[in-house]
């Protein structure tokens, strides 16, 4: 009798209590979408309105995907993408600052979407703030897999933000070693591969940004990329800093850039 009661009790336990049963991740998104796991990390996909004739579905790759991001600020922008048939996806790689470990997880998401889901092999990457380090670093390592890069006050220089001392841990090396190897990891130093591949860049960045200074980030990338004969559009709103100004998140030029460069690589 006791054995029967115990057995019934065990059968009534929630399946989440069993270690062998994976627990699906949860995430709040600005638009309805799918939340799933990639190598133990939370990822999301907001599908675009389907084009039945498309062999590859266009998508824009957003970073940083963190517990509270993307946020409500991105809603209007994501609606424009979705309605144009462009999906939005991302993966939470933590505060990785473009490190090899973070890039490895980016590659896993890329493989999942392109190989298993039929998404374009050349997404447009979209980095907000420190998401710029993540997206631009992966782009520089994989220029043949990128349709374009767009940034909203993107971090492009590790030394500018978060700084060598703070970033070193993510790279699993000392601050001194990161300092000596900065050219190997720093997006602003790694633009040549993107220019050679003809990848277009876009950024909107305020001129009084104290957190991610324009001159050391988007401004320097713009200067260097054009010196490499690369194409970049830089919009500099006057008297805007690192803030939630609507103009950053409802930027018609950014939306047009994503639409144009997504469509080029969807067949």
Image: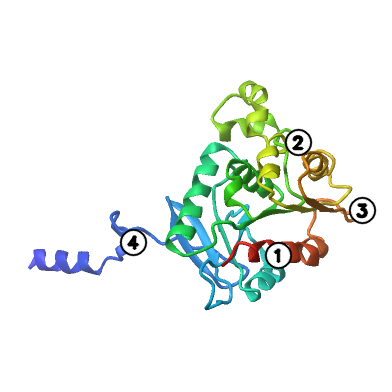
Question: Dot 1: within a 10 Å radius of its alpha carbon, few (fewer than 14), some, or many (20 or more) residues?
Answer: some
Residue 253 in percent (x, y) is at 80, 64
Mark toward the start of the polypeptide (4 vs 2): 4
Residue 239's disc is 3
Determine contact: label 3, label 4, CB under 8 Å: no
Q: Secondary structure at mark 2?
A: loop
For the N terminus, the quadrant is bottom left
* In-front residue for pair 100/23: 100
Note whether residue 126 is visible.
no
Mark toward the start of the polypeptide (1 vs 4): 4
Residue 70 in percent (x, y) is at 63, 60
Residue at image point 69% right, 38% down:
192
Residue lying at the far bottom in this picture: please name it.
Answer: 52
Q: Secondary structure at mark 3?
A: loop
Question: Dot 2: within a 10 Å radius of its alpha carbon, few (fewer than 14), some, or many (20 or more) residues?
Answer: some
Spatial CA span between label 4 and label 2: 43 Å
Mark toward the start of the polypeptide (3 vs 4): 4
Residue 16's disc is 4
Q: Nearer the viewer, mark 1 or mark 3?
A: 1
Disc 1 marks which residue? 260
Q: Secondary structure at mark 4?
A: helix
Question: In terms of image quadrants, where is residue 254?
Answer: bottom right
Determine contact: label 1, label 3, CB under 8 Å: no
Q: Name the colouring of the figure.
A: rainbow
Disc 2 marks which residue? 160
Residue 33's disc is none
Question: Does 226 sit above or below residue 245?
Answer: above
Spatial CA span between label 1 and label 4: 44 Å
Question: Does 53 sit above or below residue 91?
Answer: below
Q: Nearer the viewer, mark 4 or mark 2?
A: 2
Q: In the image, 124: left or right of 3?
A: right
Question: Does 118 sit above or below residue 145?
Answer: below
């Amino acid at each position: 009798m006791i054995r029967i009661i115990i057995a019934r009790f065990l059968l009534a336990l929630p399946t989440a209590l069993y270690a062998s049963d994976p627990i699906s991740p949860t995430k709040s998104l600005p638009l309805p979408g799918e939340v799933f796991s990639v190598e133990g990390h939370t990822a999301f996909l907001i599908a675009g309105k389907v084009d039945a004739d498309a062999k590859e579905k266009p998508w824009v790759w957003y970073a940083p995907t963190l517990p509270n991001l993307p946020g409500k600020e991105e809603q209007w922008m994501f609606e424009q993408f979705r309605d144009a048939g462009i999906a939005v996806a991302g993966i939470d790689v933590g505060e990785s600052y473009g490190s090899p470990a973070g890039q490895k997880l980016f590659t896993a998401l890329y493989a999942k979407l392109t190989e298993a889901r039929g998404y374009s092999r050349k997404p447009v990457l979209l980095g907000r703030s420190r998401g710029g380090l993540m997206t631009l670093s992966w782009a520089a390592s994989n220029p043949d897999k990128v349709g374009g890069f767009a940034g909203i006050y993107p971090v492009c220089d590790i030394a500018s933000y978060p700084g060598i001392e703070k970033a070193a841990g993510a790279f699993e090396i000392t601050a001194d070693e990161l300092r000596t190897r900065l050219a190997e990891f720093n997006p602003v130093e790694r633009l040549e591969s993107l220019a050679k591949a003809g990848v277009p860049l876009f950024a909107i960045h305020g001129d009084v940004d104290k957190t991610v200074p324009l001159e050391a980030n988007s401004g320097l990338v713009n200067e260097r990329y054009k010196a490499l004969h690369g194409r970049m559009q830089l919009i500099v709103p006057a008297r805007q800093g690192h803030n939630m100004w609507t103009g950053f998140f409802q930027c018609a030029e950014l939306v047009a850039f994503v639409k144009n460069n997504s469509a080029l690589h969807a067949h």
